[in-house]
Image: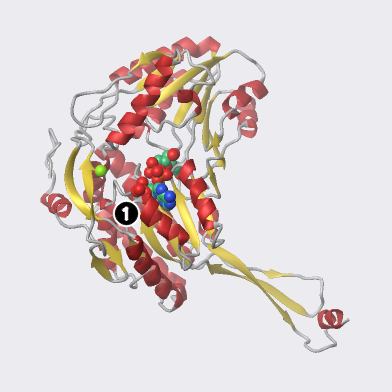
């Protein structure tokens, strides 16, 4: 294992975990891939291979799906008393909490996010998500329904969908996996997890905790592998009832096409290009650092990052100067260094992609007000970047970069319809940010913006209790909250003729 820490010594438990083997979890067994193949796991802080993990292929995915199917059709999980399911989920939350630093470090080494962000954002939200969803076990119920035919009892049952295939990205690895697992488990489903192939390690550690706690075999199966092989096999598999996917819009569209063959249910959390609107009456002391923070944190690798700035011309120069100065002070460095604000981007591929967008914007006539360059000569570090003199037709303005790059535009219109329309001019609609101390402006904007969520003067984006998801090409359905659990269930309607026989008016109607 490489040692990227200038001022932090990695505990031996983490080093030995990373250096160990990373097999697949299928049923109650840890196994190598049937092909024997492994994935290279690279530390983005150094760009060097730090370990290898089993690479699931079609055969492994099939075995994992069959284990999940057997666990759902014949095992205790969906039949268990809801309180007992909740108890196991709460025990998993406790186990993650007890191993918080270790799990955070695994993600830091695998993905490059600063340790504090991994701990207090990704791992913490994983714990909160399990605790929140454990509370739903047994609380999502059907209802009795009055129908027009007399002497009929009608009711609905809320039933778990069955086997869930969960395909996740790499930007907050543990959380990306757990936020899918927790509601699926609460609903009574069994799960096959396909974590991103570049960041599978914390999912492996999670699997060890799941095993220790004593979840029934086959309830959770973990099969990292290439998306177009392992992910595709999961989406095609006839024994999978639902796919829950987080990732790019292009892959989401591919999943919809493939899932159509079996008509499995699909939830999609996709990309974004979220607008940030700063009005002249905004509290700039808050709006400037928060806008910088919301694009540069996690090196911009956050789906809901505010990546397009629209500032009123009265405050535009002040906002741009403030964000540029913030970008220059933002400390880019080792994710293990406590003073680091921003680590590397996740991979060489992501580095090339982000720099490609910066170069294309320069070429199209944009001006770099901050950053725009590599930091250091080892690892995938990019300086926080602010682009001005942009136009709506530039690729860097239209497309999701998923890196620490903010594009800024000024507006001078007093028409909220025009201002909202400028931000709505995007195929994405994940999140949006409004900064104004005028409540009328802020709430009118919230109604006019086409996106899954709107944060006013800070607000909150991700909370286990708050539905989250995208409009337009940013997704289908919602995660989190009650709707997030219901997305793993379906209503079955039952009706009973209480006064059976031909005299019952429903039977009489049908006989006629
Ligand atoms: P990605 O390339 O779409 O990959 C996401 C996952 O899908 C990975 O596990 C990937 O496998 C897998 N995959 C790839 N091709 C597949 C296929 N044909 N069939 C089934 N699965 C397939 O996205 P990414 O680059 O990992 O993540 C960045 C994207 O995720 C950004 O667009 C970002 O906005 C989005 N995101 C959205 C949210 C949200 O909540 N809306 C949250 C986080 C990220 P590999 O391991 O081979 O890549
Ligand atoms: Mg890695």
- The x, y position of residue 71, in whole percent, is 40, 74
Q: Is residue 148 left or right of residue 469?
A: right
How packed mark 1 is, by other alpha carbons closer than 10 Å (few <14, some 14-19, many 20 or more), is: many
Tell me if residue 8 can be seen: yes
Q: Residue at x 26, y 70 (%)?
A: 29
Q: Residue furthest bottom?
A: 501
Q: Residue at x 78, y 86 (%)?
A: 499
Q: Quadrant of residue 109?
A: top left
- The x, y position of residue 213, in whole percent, is 28, 67
Residue 172 or residue 145, whichever sits in front: 172
Query: Is the C-beta of the residue carrying label 1 under 8 Å from the nearest atom of ligand 1?
Result: yes
Q: What is the basis of the colouring in this image?
A: secondary structure
Vertical comparison of 382 with 236: above or below: above
Q: Residue at x 22, y 42 (%)?
A: 42
* Quarter of the rendering occupied by the C terminus: bottom right
Q: Quadrant of residue 501?
A: bottom right
Vertical comparison of 428 with 396: above or below: below
* Quarter of the rendering occupied by the N terminus: top left
Tell me if residue 129 can be seen: no
Q: Quadrant of ligand 1?
A: top left
Residue 512 or residue 145, whichever sits in front: 512
- The x, y position of residue 354, in whole percent, is 36, 28
């Amino acid at each position: 294992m490489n040692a990227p820490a200038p001022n932090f010594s990695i505990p031996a438990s983490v080093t030995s975990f990373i250096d160990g083997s990373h097999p697949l979890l299928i049923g109650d067994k840890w196994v190598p891939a049937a092909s024997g193949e492994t994935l290279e796991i690279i530390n983005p802080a150094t760009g060097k291979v730090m370990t290898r993990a089993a690479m699931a292929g079609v055969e492994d995915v099939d075995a994992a799906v069959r284990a999940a199917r057997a666990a759902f059709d014949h095992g205790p999980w969906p039949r268990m008393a809801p309180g007992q399911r909740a108890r196991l989920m709460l025990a998993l939350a406790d186990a993650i909490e007890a191993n918080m630093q270790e799990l955070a470090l695994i993600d830091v080494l695998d993905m490059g996010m600063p340790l504090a962000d991994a701990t207090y954002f990704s791992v913490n939200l994983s714990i909160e998500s399990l605790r929140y969803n454990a509370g739903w076990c047994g609380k999502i119920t059907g209802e009795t329904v009055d129908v027009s035919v007399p002497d009929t009892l009608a009711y609905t049952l809320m039933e778990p969908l069955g086997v869930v295939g969960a395909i996740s990205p790499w930007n907050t690895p543990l959380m990306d996996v757990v936020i899918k697992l927790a509601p699926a488990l609460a609903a009574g489903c069994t799960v096959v997890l396909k974590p991103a192939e570049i960041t599978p390690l914390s999912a492996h550690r999670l699997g060890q905790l799941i095993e220790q706690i004593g979840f029934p075999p086959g309830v959770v199966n973990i099969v990292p592998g290439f998306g177009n092989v392992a992910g595709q096999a999961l989406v095609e598999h006839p024994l999978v009832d639902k796919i829950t996917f987080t990732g790019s819009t292009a892959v989401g569209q591919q999943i919809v096409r493939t899932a159509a063959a079996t008509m499995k249910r699909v939830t999609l959390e996709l990309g974004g290009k979220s607008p940030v609107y700063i009005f002249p009456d905004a509290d700039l002391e808050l709006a400037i650092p928060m806008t910088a923070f919301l694009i540069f944190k996690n090196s911009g690798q956050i789906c809901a990052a505010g990546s397009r700035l629209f500032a009123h011309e009265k405050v535009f120069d002040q906002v741009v100067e403030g964000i540029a100065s913030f970008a220059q002070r933002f400390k880019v460095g080792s994710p293990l260094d406590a003073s680091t604000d921003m680590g590397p981007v996740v991979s060489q591929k992501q580095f090339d992609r982000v720099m490609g967008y910066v170069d294309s914007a320069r070429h199209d006539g944009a001006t770099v007000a901050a950053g725009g360059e590599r930091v250091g000569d080892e690892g995938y570090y990019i300086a926080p970047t602010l682009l001005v003199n942009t136009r709506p037709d530039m690729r860097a303005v239209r497309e999701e970069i998923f890196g620490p790059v903010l594009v800024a535009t000024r507006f001078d219109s007093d028409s909220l319809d025009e201002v909202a329309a400028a931000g709505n001019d995007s195929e994405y609609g994940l999140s949006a940010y409004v900064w104004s101390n005028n409540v009328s402006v802020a709430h009118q904007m919230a109604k006019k913006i086409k996106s899954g969520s709107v944060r006013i003067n800070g607000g909150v984006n991700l909370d286990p209790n708050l539905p989250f998801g995208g409009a337009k090409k940013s997704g289908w359905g919602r995660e989190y909250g009650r709707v997030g659990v219901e997305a793993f269930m379906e209503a079955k309607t039952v009706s009973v003729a209480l006064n059976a026989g031909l005299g019952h008016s429903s039977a009489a109607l049908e006989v006629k």
